[in-house]
Image (spheres, helix red, strand yellow):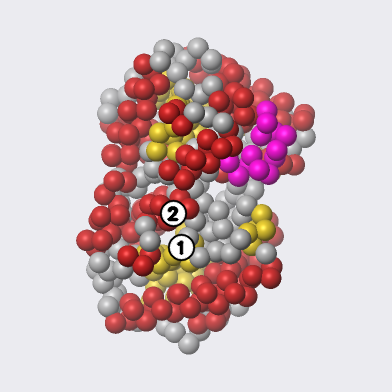
């Protein structure tokens, strides 16, 4: 099968960027032919080990045609970006025009059998309108649903074309219901596929049995990801032996806030910046606890990577996460933090912050004390959670969706 993959932002650095890389690799291993259209800026380079440069068309931002930074599906990205809710109509028109040209050019060069877009948002609308005569599937990563709430007018423009996409892939059953509700898409057109991890990279190695408990956060340094909340909470358990690693980057005042809070913890936080998958996997194998304190998520792939690496998990009890990881009372390695009602889709009320910090500090302290007694995790439980989420198994489910979409044509 000849597959045209489309992503509106850099095919790296974020969850959807890593996802599309994994899908392309798995597709190639299964004998499929791949072509990629993606948004980039600042001389971005994608390794030829992922896809040949001749099989890519990049829509370039911060250029004469698109003289603004690439709009991020999240409002805080690990590189310079624009925010969809602040784009002018002129910028949106230029964005749609640039992607239309790239997608049509890719069709003429590659003659695809099927289109696979990422995010139920603007680029999927453009692809559907540009190539209505080809079967098309879209992976929903969750941030498109968030953008719909933040950019209602633009969301209404996206809604109708997205309804005509042949198949939608969701990360969880909860997300499937969200897609049905927001886009009024027939549930029979939505397949729960999930996200994957690379089991050749992320695997268990014996954890350190003495010294400080190693704790890791990996992701964007932003408020929506809960990083300031995490750092303030760590200040409440200074009496315990821990070292916190922050892997990832961000931009603007939110990144500065995270760095400043980290510096106040007297050398107990190591800020690694952006790590490639090999370095992240190495760090995870040495880590006892992985923390993801997000206020909004779809199904973060990094959780599966951390569990496969033998990390105990502390994360917020968001619906998609809870669905896949289960009730924390039944788990030895998963600890879910309950959130109060949020003020917006990804931020709490200020009045609740003290309670949130107390709650997170209490859970982290409890898990640290458990690890001091029993450093090694229950890997049988870890395998039960992760066994369905290797990329090989996830891509088999994606292939089934390709076949369903193609049969309708």
* Mark 1, other Cα within 10 Å: few <14 / some 14–19 / many ≥20: many
Q: Give the dominant element type of the magenta stretch: helix, strand or loop.
A: helix
Which residue: 39% across, 73% down?
A: 214
Q: From the viewer's perspective, tell me whether residue 272 is left or right of residue 388.
A: right
For the record, the magenta segment spans 144-157
The image quadrant where one finds the N terminus is: top left
Which residue: 44% across, 79% down?
A: 365
- Element type at mark 1: strand
Query: Is residue 146 found inside the magenta-colored segment of the image?
Result: yes
Which residue: 32% across, 65% down?
A: 330
Vertical order, 227 against 185 (above or below): below
Vertical order, 33 against 376 (above or below): above
Q: Which mark is residue 171?
A: none
The residue where tag 1 is placed is 315
The image quadrant where one finds the C terminus is: top left
The residue where tag 2 is placed is 321
- Element type at mark 2: helix
Q: Give the percent coordinates (x, y) of residue 248.
A: 51, 57
* Mark 2, other Cα within 10 Å: few <14 / some 14–19 / many ≥20: many
The answer to whether marks 1 and 2 mark residues whose Cβ atoms lie closer than 8 Å is yes
Which of the pair 390/103 is nearer the observer? Answer: 390
Quadrant of the rendered image containing residue 54:
top left
Earlier residue among tags 1 and 2: 1
Which residue: 50% across, 34% down?
A: 118
Vertical order, 213 against 13 (above or below): below
């Amino acid at each position: 099968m000849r597959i045209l993959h489309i992503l509106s932002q850099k095919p790296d650095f974020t969850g959807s960027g890593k996802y599309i890389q994994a899908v392309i690799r798995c597709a190639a291993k299964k004998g499929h032919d791949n072509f990629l259209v993606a948004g980039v800026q600042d001389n971005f380079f994608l390794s030829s080990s992922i896809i040949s440069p001749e099989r890519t068309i990049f829509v370039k931002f911060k250029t004469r045609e698109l003289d603004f930074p690439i709009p991020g599906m999240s409002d805080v990205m690990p590189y310079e970006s624009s925010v969809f809710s602040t784009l002018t109509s002129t910028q949106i028109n230029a964005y749609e025009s640039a992607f239309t040209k790239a997608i049509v050019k890719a069709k003429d060069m590659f003659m695809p059998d099927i289109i696979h877009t990422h995010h139920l948002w603007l680029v999927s609308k453009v692809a559907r309108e540009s190539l209505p005569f080809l079967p098309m599937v879209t992976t929903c990563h969750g941030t498109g649903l968030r953008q719909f709430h933040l950019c209602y007018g633009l969301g209404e423009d996206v809604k109708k074309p997205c309804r005509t996409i042949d198949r939608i892939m969701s990360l969880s059953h909860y997300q499937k219901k969200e897609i049905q509700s927001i886009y009024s898409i027939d549930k029979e057109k939505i397949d729960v596929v999930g996200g994957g991890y690379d089991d050749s990279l992320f695997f268990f190695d014996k954890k350190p049995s003495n010294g400080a408990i190693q704790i890791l956060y990996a992701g964007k340094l932003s408020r929506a990801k809960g990083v300031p909340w995490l750092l303030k909470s760590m200040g409440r358990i200074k009496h315990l032996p821990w070292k916190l690693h922050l892997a990832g980057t961000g931009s603007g005042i939110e990144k500065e806030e995270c760095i400043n809070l980290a510096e106040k913890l007297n050398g107990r936080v190591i800020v690694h910046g952006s790590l490639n998958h090999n370095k992240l996997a190495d760090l995870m194998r040495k880590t006892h606890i992985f923390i993801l304190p997000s206020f909004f998520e779809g199904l973060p792939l990094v959780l599966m990577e951390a569990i496969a690496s033998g990390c105990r998990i502390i994360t917020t009890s968001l619906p998609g996460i809870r669905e896949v990881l289960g009730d924390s009372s039944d788990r030895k390695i998963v600890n879910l933090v309950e959130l109060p009602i949020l003020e917006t889709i990804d931020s709490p009320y200020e009045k609740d912050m003290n309670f949130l910090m107390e709650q997170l500090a209490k859970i982290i302290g409890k898990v640290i004390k458990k690890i001091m007694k029993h450093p090694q995790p229950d890997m049988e439980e870890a395998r039960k959670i992760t066994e369905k989420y290797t990329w090989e198994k996830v891509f088999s489910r994606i292939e089934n969706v390709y076949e369903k979409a193609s049969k309708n044509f």
